[in-house]
Image (spheres, grey):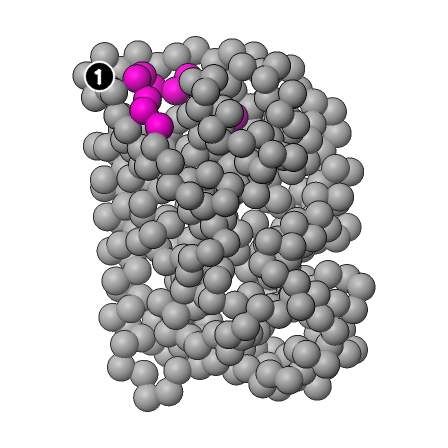
């Protein structure tokens, strides 16, 4: 059985192959105009991680002005926080960007590399900060964190991409937003932003707290070749299911398995981590995703599929770790317990 590192790598390789065909040429990278805040908040020291998940500090002496983002979920977050002028370049989204920031995303400089640029390509762009996945900062990837820090380039690994911890909203989504607020000196923005998220989650939890029986869930991704992956508790989506009042039946790492492994479970609902294999730049609609899953003959016998108890969450939503997280929790809860949300 593959470990989570390999699971993410291969799972992403599938969607990034599709992405390479969806995103054509590289746009010209131009320097963005710095925003003058006149702040006295610096220096500020942030504790983050290297690619093997050791904690590591970096001190910012001014607001980053040339940020490269290699995780589109982080790109969406920066755009939603009004930091688009700070983004030097990013990668294309893993599907449709969130509607409220889609226009902003379309105006960004998008790198040709579908998953991550090389260390050499990054050096040419001369960033002062890089935000991405933990795995991307390996010696054979974009370069190690300490190497970038030696060049006075800040790095920020999204904690939702760490492999050795069980992520929660507090340790991933909220903490990341708090750190972004400190790094860019926008705490008056990020403070209420986080509080809004917490208020929405608390409302969901209050509506599902006295359930006589919690619905069971399986979080399933189809790799289009009769193999599947199930998301276990090492993924943020599992905690999201818990907050929505569900129980994730998959407790162990179950990656790239045949239908017989999936059929060993009998969930009330399936969360389908959907990917549009014909057009990676667009997400599947709920109807398209449900039809796609119900068309798989090897899984047709599952009770949840027969009953149409399928919740469509696009790959980009499940692996976002940012602005889509609370929307997804609400969607899961409403589908599991519609009578609670009338």
Residue 326 falls in image quadrant: bottom left
For the point 54% across and 14% down, the residue is: 126
Residue 61 falls in image quadrant: top left
Using residue 222 as the reference point, say whether residue 200 is left or right of it. Answer: left
The answer to whether residue 43 shows anywhere in this view is yes
Judge whether residue 68 is colored magenta: yes
For the point 32% across and 24% down, the residue is: 59
Work out whether 26 lies above or below 169. Answer: above
Q: Provide the residue span drawn in magenta.
A: 58-69
Considering the image in quadrants, where does the N terminus appear?
bottom right
Using residue 210 as the reference point, say whether residue 326 is left or right of it. Answer: right
Of residues 105 and 322, which is closer to you in this image?
A: 322
Judge whether residue 323 is colored magenta: no
Residue 279: image location, x then y, percent: 73, 46
Of residues 178 and 126, which is closer to you in this image?
A: 126
Residue 162: image location, x then y, percent: 47, 50
Residue closest to the far left? 40
The answer to whether residue 219 shows anywhere in this view is no
Using residue 316 as the reference point, say whether residue 334 is left or right of it. Answer: left
């Amino acid at each position: 059985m593959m470990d989570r590192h390999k699971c993410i790598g291969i799972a992403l390789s599938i969607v990034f192959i599709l992405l390479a065909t969806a995103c054509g040429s590289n746009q010209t990278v131009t320097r963005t105009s710095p925003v003058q805040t006149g702040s006295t908040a610096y220096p500020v020291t942030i504790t983050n991680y290297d690619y093997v998940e050791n904690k590591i500090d970096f001190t910012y002496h001014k607001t980053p002005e040339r940020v490269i983002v290699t995780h589109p979920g982080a790109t969406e977050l920066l755009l939603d926080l009004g930091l688009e002028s700070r983004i030097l370049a990013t990668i294309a989204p893993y599907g449709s960007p969130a509607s409220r920031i889609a226009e902003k995303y379309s105006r960004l400089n998008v790198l040709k590399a579908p998953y991550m640029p090389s260390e050499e390509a990054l050096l040419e762009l001369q960033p002062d900060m890089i935000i991405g996945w933990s795995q991307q900062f390996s010696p054979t990837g974009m370069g190690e964190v300490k190497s970038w820090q030696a060049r006075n380039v800040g790095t920020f690994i999204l904690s939702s991409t760490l492999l050795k911890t069980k992520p929660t909203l507090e340790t991933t989504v909220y903490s990341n937003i708090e750190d972004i607020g400190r790094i860019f000196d926008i705490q008056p923005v990020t403070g209420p932003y986080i509080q809004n998220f917490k208020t929405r989650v608390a409302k969901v939890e209050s509506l599902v707290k006295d359930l006589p029986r919690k619905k069971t869930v399986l979080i399933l991704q189809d790799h289009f070749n009769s193999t599947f992956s199930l998301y276990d508790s090492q993924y943020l989506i599992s905690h999201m299911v818990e907050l929505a009042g569900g129980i994730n039946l998959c407790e162990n790492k179950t990656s790239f398995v045949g239908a017989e492994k999936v059929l060993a479970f009998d969930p009330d609902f399936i969360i389908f981590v959907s990917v549009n294999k014909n057009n990676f730049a667009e997400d599947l609609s709920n109807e398209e995703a449900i039809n796609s899953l119900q068309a798989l003959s090897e899984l047709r016998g599952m009770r949840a599929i027969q009953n149409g108890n399928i919740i469509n969450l696009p790959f980009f939503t499940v692996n976002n770790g940012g602005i889509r997280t609370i929307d997804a929790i609400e969607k899961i809860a409403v589908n599991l317990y519609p009578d609670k949300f009338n």
